[in-house]
Image: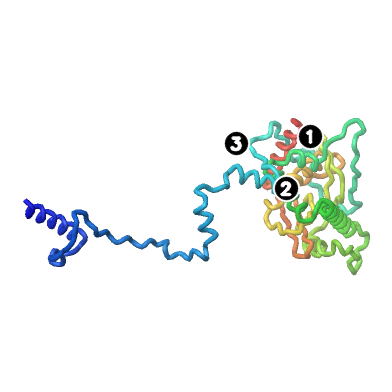
Amino acid sequence: MALTMQALTLLIQCKCARSMGFSSGQFSRVNNLSTSCQWRARKKVSQYSTVDTERYSSLVRAVLSSKNSSQTPASIEDEDCQLYGPVIRSRPPSQQPKAPKNLHPLLNKAKGQSEYVPGPLARITLQRDSNTSLPSVTRILQKTMPPDQAFYLERWKRRMIAELGEEGFKEYSLNIFRQGQLFHAAIEDKFTQETPSVEDPEQPLEVSGYIESASRVLNDITGVRAIESAVHHSSLQYLGIVDCVAQYRGSLCVIDWKTSEKPKPLLRHTYDNPLQVAAYIGALNSDNNYSYQVENGLIVVAYKDGSPAHAHLLNLQQIMPFWEKWLLRLEEYAEK
């Protein structure tokens, strides 16, 4: 019986050894073996064991110290609100483009495109009725600004205030406004000279870059009919002041002068400016103070560094979608 138990024990030990990959001949003589297998499989080397833990110690500690990230969508949004202000949620776009309730015509059938006759420039002063204060084009566009556009404008303002401070930002805004006024005045002087001088008149140093930028566009403008002149839409009841009405490369246009420190080579970079020009065209065509009508618009963006200005010309076909958008903004303003 003892011999049988010894043989059984040896058989179990040999089977355990063979399971580890050794032949039976290698274990012909085994001493002091027990019934339990003492051989274990060699552990595989982990690929992470070769990581330089000293170099990435801070990262390792961060990963091992916490299983969950402390950042959550709510905390990220709170942090963003503290830095840039609350996010303005815009309404999802409708499936079908919205059309104005009253598609008022842009052109006036009672008017034609009269030939240019040299004479005094129209410079009609803005007259507001003492009983009713009609809204201006600028005011309507500001009060009906889309939420996403208002968000980015406010974000830019907060970033500028963070860089310049409250007083610095106010001074910056006043300088931008003053430079715009000086630029418009310089163009007005150029077009209102009774006898063109051989030498260009001396311009304020602050706007010399803008004038240099717009010089090529100015050379293509002829037959100026109006400068800084008020327009009034008699049916839709709004006011505006057009910068210029003149021929640009043979097309009669309402011209809007803009200044910028950043390039705006594409029309979409001008934001609401096309709507503004479309509103001025509609008002001029409705205003009986002007015997002609205009079908085209021109947005000229001049740059402070003197680089060539971008001139965005819009013909009647291109103006019409902006005219319809302007009518929608006008209806939205009336509903406020």
At label 1, the amino acid type is Leu
Query: In front: mark 1 or mark 2?
Result: 2
Q: Which label's residue is closer to the chain start, 2 or 3?
A: 3
User: Is disc 1 placed on a helix, strand or loop?
Assistant: loop
Number of other residues with Cα within 10 Å of mark 2, as a class: few under 14, some 14 to 19, many 20 or more: few
Q: Is label 3 in a helix, a strand or a loop?
A: loop
**Residue type, label 2:** Leu
Q: Which residue is mark 2?
A: 153
Q: Which mark is residue 103?
A: none
Instruction: Give how far apart the Cα atoms at labels 1 and 3 are.
Output: 26 Å
Label of residue 94 in the image: 3
Q: Is residue 244 visible?
A: no
> Is residue 310 visible from the viewing direction of this image?
yes
- Per the model, the C-alpha gap separating discs 2 and 3 is 24 Å
- On the picture, is 58 further left or further right than 168? left
Image spot of residue 28 (x, y percent): 12, 65
What's the residue at 90%, 69% (across, down)? 199
* Amino acid found under the numbered disc labelled 3: Ser
Mark 1 or mark 3: whose residue is earlier in sequence: 3
